[in-house]
Image (cartoon, rainbow, N blue to C red):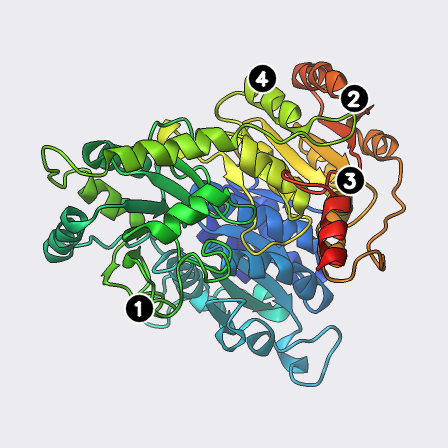
Amino acid sequence: MTEASISQIGGHLLVQCLVKQGTTHAFGVPGESFLAVLDGFHHYRDQIRFVINRQEGGAAFMAEAHGKLTGRPGVCFVTRGPGATNASIGVHTAYQDSTPMVLFVGDVASDTRDREAFQEVDYQSFFGPSTKGFAKRVERIDEVARIPEYVARAFATAMNGRPGPVVLVLPEDMLAQAVPTNPVTGALPVALPYVAAVDGHPGAEPLSKLREALLLAERPLVIAGGPGWSPEAAQALQRFADNWSLPVANAFRFQDTFDNHHPLYAGDVGIGINPKLAARIKASDLILALGPRLGEMTTGGYTLIEAPLPRQKLVHIHASAEELNRVFQAHLAILASPAQTALALADLIAPRAVTWTDWARACHADYLANLVPQPLPGLIDMPAVVVALQRHLPSDTVVTNGAGNFASWVHRFYRYHGWAKGCKTQLAPTNGAMGYGVPAGIAAAITTGRLAVTIAGDGDFLMNGQELATAVQYGAKTIIVVLNNGMFGTIRMHQEREYPRHVSGTALCNPDFCALAQAYGYAGVRITRTDEFEPALLAALERSQGSLIEVILDPQVISTRGTLDAITKAALER
């Protein structure tokens, strides 16, 4: 093929479409099913970067993290069958976290389809909307000339309404075909224009009703979160809260939506919630949910806000009509984006005085009191470790974690600056996917250039630790703090609560994490005492390479509030 003819094949047109949509990075593991796309990445290497991952789950997590950071769909490429199934964990995370993402799957050739060809899978059945937990839409591109149409629609679908993942299936023969000219005009298909998200405005009447509800309230509380935020929107929410003296809590793992240093911040609503905040949510007479879908974790298993009829008046503002009144019958449901709503609320005329100023102050006082830790055994003081992170990390640091009890230390004690101060600073999976933190941090470092710090458990780290090789290959510096207690701690905690002293399936035989990190090209340091952490962190901040700090944690320190023995004792007494 000549250079001119190569540039007219489907794989190249697909990459042109990604560039037109503003995509700067695509993540994935190469496969022979999309060689033509890989050649397109080579052809347009000055405009878009293909980041090579070591496992498709890590690649999908990186794409999901990129979608969270930018608000544009994170892009991931995997091959058929095993590649797609490995990537499914990232698709599920994007779905439950409402993150825009597009997964491209290289597929079997058209002439072998529906024969159970090598690695063939029915992706509509595997990822389709009927699964109620994977993709918003699954489509297959059979005609080269329609690539621009499908890509533009995928981006629009991923961003609009409740954001989420879209899967596009790419037959390998289609990608290698020459792009045909229009039989009438003779023109070649071109990438369609940049697709912007459609942000719905709440409208004057709903805003008026919302104001009326506020004026009748005595104990109002805002729960902010979900996707679609920007610095301008977060700053507008802050002005609204100031004008009305409203306490604001952040939804589960959206702790950077409202500045944790603000005097009206009430804390985070999720796993390990401050008991006083939980009591205030129940005691509130008006919940203004701005952006979150109010899932199981944010509602305390549907007990803080009861389904289907909340005890509190509920004003639920969400970008998806399908989400409103689906689980909770709201007093007032408003179909609008959180960003547009926050901007409108900033101008909502407040009365000269409100009756709940003492309530708002008390909510913040409860949050501050929750920052004071309980004494726990062992040589590592985890609250002090988090305080050291807070003291030395730049305010724009991206803090990431996967899933496990280890994450509760940053959830409770780390104070996020977040969107109001210019950028997103938390990447964490609301679907509880283990292995998320390491690739998410690496994606943040590669695509933003900002410092990324990951908190991981020993079991959590081993699920995607191979992506340290990706970090080193692309010069991405991350700092990873591995809390090693030699077990799957969350499951062990539940095990002791339900089946005390029957340890089964939760003990771990771990590698030498420092040696493993060094083998990948990271620095590795092990600490066993609290006073060793701060020097290790300062050294990591000074290094040009990434660092892994292994923290040997007493297995008894199972949560921020209690010990494993205390849980066992309570279970035996029960």
Which residue in the protein does label 3 denote?
Answer: 556
Tell me how far mark 1 sits from mark 2, CA to CA.
51 Å
Query: Identity of the amino acid at label 1?
Result: Gln
Query: How far from the left and from the top, in percent, is residue 491?
Result: 73, 55
Front-lying residue, 5 or 517: 517
Badge 4 or badge 2: first in the primary sequence: 4
Q: Is residue 33 above or below residue 361?
A: below
**Tag 4, which secondary structure?**
helix
Which residue in the protein does label 2 denote?
Answer: 529
Which residue in the protein does label 4 denote?
Answer: 392
Task: Indicate the quadrant where residue 321 lies.
Answer: bottom left
Q: Are marks 1 and 4 in contact (CB under 8 Å)?
A: no
Badge 4 or badge 3: first in the primary sequence: 4
Tell me how far mark 2 sits from mark 3, CA to CA.
15 Å
Front-lying residue, 492 or 143: 492
| Nearest-to-viewer mark from 3 and 1 | 3
**Tag 2, which secondary structure?**
loop
Q: Is residue 301 above or below residue 445?
A: below
Query: How far from the left and from the top, in percent, is residue 571?
Result: 73, 56
